[in-house]
Amino acid sequence: MQLLLKKLIFLFLIITSISIQAKDWSGLFDHAQYQTAKISPDGKHLAVSVLHNNKLALAFLETETLKFVGQATFGGKFEAGQFHWVNNERVVIKVLERSYNIEKPLFYGELYSVNYDGSKGLMIYGFRMEARATMSRIGNKKATRGWAEIIDILPKDKKHILISSTPMSRTGERHASVHKLNVYTGILKRKMTASPAYFSRFITDNSGKLSALTALTKKNKVSLYIRKEREWEKIPSDKIGDKVYPLSVSASGEYLYTIDNYQQNLKGIFKLNLENNEYSEVYTDKNVDITDVEISTDGRSAYAIRVDDNYPAYLILNKNIPEAKIFKSLLTTFPYNKVKITSKSEDGSTYVILVSSDIEPGNLYLYNKDKNQLRFLFKLMPKFDSADFIKMEPISLISSDNYKINGYFTQAKSNNPDKLSPLVILVHGGPHGIRDYWRFSSQVQYLALNGYSVLQVNYRGSGGYGSDFEKLGHRHWGDTIQQDIMESYQWLVKNNKVKKNQACIMGASFGAYSAIQSTIKYPGMYKCAIANAGVYDLELIFEEGDIQKRRFGMAYLKTVLGTDQEKLKAMSPVYSADKINIPLFLAHGEDDQRAPFEHVERLKSALDKAGKPYQWFVVDKEGHGFYNPKNQKAYMKGVVDFLDEHLK
C-alpha cells in the first residue's frame, strides 16, 4: 500500500507536468483521485484522502517534503470517509461500508482512529467495536449498535471528542445521547444529556459546551432548543422559521447565529439572544437565499457567507477572525472561483485551501501566512486541465405568467462556431430545495465536449430563491414546472443560442420524471428524452421507497404533491404512455430505495401496452443514480450514442 500511494503521488506529478494530447472524456466519471487534505494542528503533517484500488484511503505526508509517513486503509467492503485531526498525532475517520447489494459505500455510524504513522488503529465506536476491542486488549468493552456523529473535536482536550450516539432503528427515529469518546481507547463516557426529539443536530459554544440543538418534527418542520441550566428549552415555533439552521455561538456566548427566513421570503442570517430569546435579522441578500456559511476550521465561528445569484459571491461577517482575513485575501487571489479553507495549523501560520470553478474540479493548495506564499499540492482530477473545459453562462428570463426563471447555459464545443449545436436540457432533481449552481459538472462537460449544448433550469419549486418561489412548485410537478423548462428552452431559441426543434430533455430522479412528463405535456417540442432513476407513478411514492417510511417524509409528500388521486394520476406518466411519440432512453438501478425499480417497470409495462419503443439500461447493485464509474461511463456512452442517433 505504501509503495502504491507513493506511486500515486509521483504519477500526479508526471501527469500535471506534461501536455495530454488525447483526452478520454469518459475519465470524467472516474472517482476523483484526491478528495481533500487537512493539516495537523502543529502543521507538520497532512492527511490526504486518496483513491486506492477504487476505495478511499488516507495517506499521511510530511507537510514540508510531502514524504509518505503512514496510511489508514480498510479491507473488504470498508473504506475511509470524512476525517478530523483531533491532536498532532491522531485522526478520527468515519468508516464507510458497501453492502452486498449496492455499489455506493454508506456511513453506518462507525468511527475509527489512527496515528499519522499508521499505528494504534482502532475502531472506537460502532457495532463492530467489540471484536476490535478484544484484539486490541482493551478489556470488556461492548459494541454499540448506534450511529455516531461528531459534535465537537474539543481542541483543548487531546484525548476526547464530543459525539452524539443514536440507537440503530429502521427509520432513525430515536433519541440521541451525548458523550465524550476517548480516541485512543474507545471508552464512551456516561451520557451527558439526551435529545428531547428525533434527528438532532447539536451545537457547542467556543469552550465546547453544549448550547443548542435542532430536531425534525413529524410535520417536516425544524424545532430549536437551547441549553439552560442543564435542561433543553424549546423556542416557541412562532418565534423562528420552520427550517431554521443553527450555525455557531458568538465568541461572547451571547448569541446563536442561524440561517432562517423567519417572517420573510428569503433565507438570511439571524441571531438569537440566548438570555432573553430575542430573535433578529443580521443580513439577507436582496435576490437569493444564503447558500453556505464559512465556519472556522475548529467548527466554532461563522465568518463569511456565500450567495449564488448567478455566480457565487462572498460577504465577510466577522473581520476580526484571523481566518476571515486570510479567506478575504484568497478570494482576491482566486477571482471567479469557489474557495474553501479545509484546515489550518493551530498557530494560524499554515492553511490548506480547496479552489474550484465551473471549469476546474478542484485544486488543493498550501498557504503559508508568514511568507504570504501559496504552494500547489494536488489536482482532484489530475488527468484533466481547466483549459479542457467549457464555461457556464448564467441566464434569466421572465415566464409567461411573470416569474423570473434563472438557469445556466453551456455552449457545446464545436469545430464550426458559426453553426448552432443541438441542445440537451438537463433537469435537476429534487425538485424542492435543490437547484443548479455555477460549478463543475462531469455530465455537463461530457455532453458539451461531445457536441451538445446544455441548458440547466432553476424552475419554480427549486431551492435558493426564497420560500415563495419554492412553494410555487408544490402540487405542480406535471404542469407549471414543465412550463418553466419549456419556456427556458424557447428563450434560448429566440436569443439564437440553439436551433428550434433540436433539443432532447434529460434528467435523473425528479429530472427523469420531468423528461418523460414534458414529452407528454408538450408533444413535438423535444426530439427525444433520457430518464434515469425516475418516479413515474406519483401515487406509488406514497406506498414504496424510503421517503414515506418516516413520519416527516409522509408530511413532505402531502405538502408538495397533495392527496388528490385524480390529479396525481393526471401528472403520472404511466397513465399517459400512449401520448409519447418520441424515442426514450430509460435507465434505472435495481436497488434504488428512493425511486424503487417498480416505477420504471410500470412505465415499461405501459409503453409495451401502447406499443411505444424505448431503449433500456438497467444495472443491478446500483441505487438512486449510478455510483460505480464503469456503470456511469457505460450509461453516458449510451446517452451520447442515443443523442447521436436521434438529435444530430
Image (spheres, grey):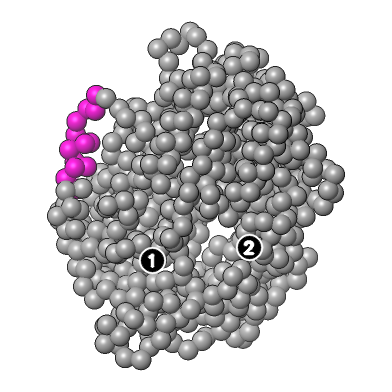
Q: Name the residue under label 2.
A: 271
Q: Which SS class for mark 1?
A: strand
Amino acid type indicated by mark 1? Val
Foreground mark, 2 or 1? 1
Tell which circle, 2 or 1, labels the residue nearer the N-terminal end: 1
How far across and how far down the image is residue 489, in percent? 64, 23
Q: Residue at x 61, y 76 (%)?
A: 174
Q: How far is disc 2 from disc 1 in space, using C-alphas?
A: 35 Å
Q: Residue at x 54, y 65 (%)?
A: 248
Q: Which SS class for mark 2?
A: strand
Q: Nearer the viewer, residue 214 or 280?
A: 214
Identify the image quadrant of the N terminus: bottom left
Q: Tell me where residue 17 sits by quadrant.
A: top left
Q: Residue at x 44, y 87 (%)?
A: 189
Q: Which of 34 and 478 is in front in this view?
A: 478
Is residue 313 shown to the viewer in this render?
A: no
How far across and how far down the image is residue 376, in percent? 25, 44
**From what the image shows, is residue 514 above or below residue 221?**
above
- Report the span colored magenta: 9-21
Neighbours of disc 2 within 10 Å: few (<14), some (14-19), many (20+): many
Which numbered tag is attached to residue 446?
none
Q: Tell me where residue 581 sits by quadrant.
A: top right
Left or right: residue 151 versus residue 533 is: left
Amino acid type indicated by mark 2? Lys
Q: Mark 1 points at which residue?
A: 95
Q: Is residue 25 located in the magenta-colored stretch of the structure?
A: no
